[in-house]
Amino acid sequence: MKRAALVDADLRAARGIEHLLIEQGFRVFLFATLGRFLDSLLRASFDALLMDLHMPGMEGREMLRALRGSPKTRRLPIIALSGKPRAEEDVAAVFDAGADEFFFKPPDPRLLVARLHSLLSREALAAPETSLRCAGIAVYPESRVCRIDDEERRLTRLEFDILLQFMRNPRRVLTRGYLIHALWRGDGSRGARAVDRHIHSLRTKMGAYGGLLETLVGIGYRLREAEAKTRRA
Amino acid sequence: MPKKILVAEDEAEYRLLLGRVLQEAGYEVAAAANGRKALELFEGGKPDLILLDVVLPDMTGFELYKQLRSKGARATPVLFCTVRSAASSLARAVEGGAVDYVLKPFDPDDLLRRVRAALG
């Protein structure tokens, strides 16, 4: 039996969708807050997630990006739901943030079921590897391949891990402390200078795109670019 | 008269980053590395906005917010910042009265958008 997580603070709306999914043979897990859903991920996994984008205390698009950055939910089929008026919702931004499908509430039941089955079939077909892209840089986290302008570029393990951090966090400032924690789990013997040294080397290997890694003196670095997108290669 | 923002952030790099981004945008920043210092700075001049890290060395950001509210910050907008792995605690922050939150690591432009929105 497929397991679907349904996150919606509006219980009346959620009950309608829940019944629909149960009719389709799903086991449904209803969460009134995204926090509770995130907590549940520590001990459970789901085949699909349907989430309201506008929950109290959470920015839905931010949460979509966070879910796509996590290994456990990177490939989870996600259907985003919005109760906002059509003119106020930036649907393209919702897809950019990582949603697989989007519906205004209340969703058309037949369409919702059809799209959900379609997403699940797609996953079953051993989805091709996800890549992260920014300008001419493409990173494949699973096979640990980096391509610059479609040519494979050999990186050391650490250079690849550093680049992956930036590709997963475009425009965000990654402090050296953050990188030390992410790369060496906070091992204090790995100093800021080690980070600087690896970034210098990575920049060289990024060629024309090395300049996208901006230094913020005394703080850290960030990957400058309009938007890095996650795509199915 | 620039708007004043009280920042409580224990990590030096983030404190420097927040100060730099906010000052470059024209705000006056008072930054503290712990809750006790933040309370002192608050007494020294009421801010227009408070930006609190959820994790501080001497108290949590939630505890600090409670104390600031008891000292007169009830009407002052508050933004919490935290790491992504602790994002579930933000629901609690909003229930406690925060107007918004910032996830670390953050995009400076996104931070400024949230600050401007919070200041109205």
Image (spheres, grey):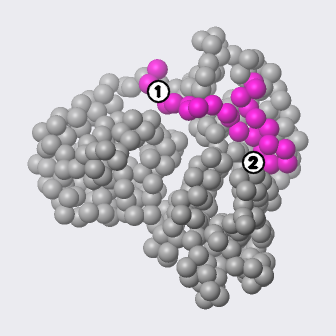
Could you tell whether B116 is left or right of A178 in the image? Answer: left
Q: Nearer the viewer, residue A171 or A72?
A: A171
Can you name the residue that lies furthest to the right here?
Answer: A193
Can you name the residue that lies furthest to the front here?
Answer: B1
Q: Which numbered disc flags the more N-terminal residue, 1 or 2?
A: 2
**Where does the image place residue B95, in percent across and percent down from the top left?**
45, 73
**Where does the image place residue A24, in percent across and percent down from the top left?**
14, 44
Could you tell whether B71 is left or right of B95 in the image? Answer: right
Chain letter of mark 2 equals A
| Mark 2 residue element | strand
Q: Nearer the viewer, residue B49 or B40?
A: B49
| Mark 1 residue element | strand
The answer to whether residue A115 is visible is yes
Could you tell whether B98 is left or right of A87 in the image? Answer: right
For marks 1 and 2, give the CA distance: 26 Å
Q: Amino acid at mark 2?
A: Thr
Q: Is residue A116 above or below residue B45?
A: above
Can you name the residue that lies furthest to the top here?
Answer: A151
Picture disc at residue B57: none
Which stretch appears magenta?
A210-233
**Where does the image place residue A228, in percent across and percent down from the top left?**
56, 31
Q: Amino acid at mark 1?
A: Arg
Q: Is residue A26 magenta?
A: no
Q: Residues within 10 Å of mark 2 (few under 14, many from 20)?
A: many
Q: Is residue A228 magenta?
A: yes
User: Residue at 59% of width from left, 32% of height from top?
Assistant: A226
Q: Is residue A38 above or below residue B10?
A: above
Could you tell whether B23 is left or right of A48 in the image? Answer: right
Q: Which residue is mark 2?
A: A175
Q: Which residue is mark 1?
A: A231
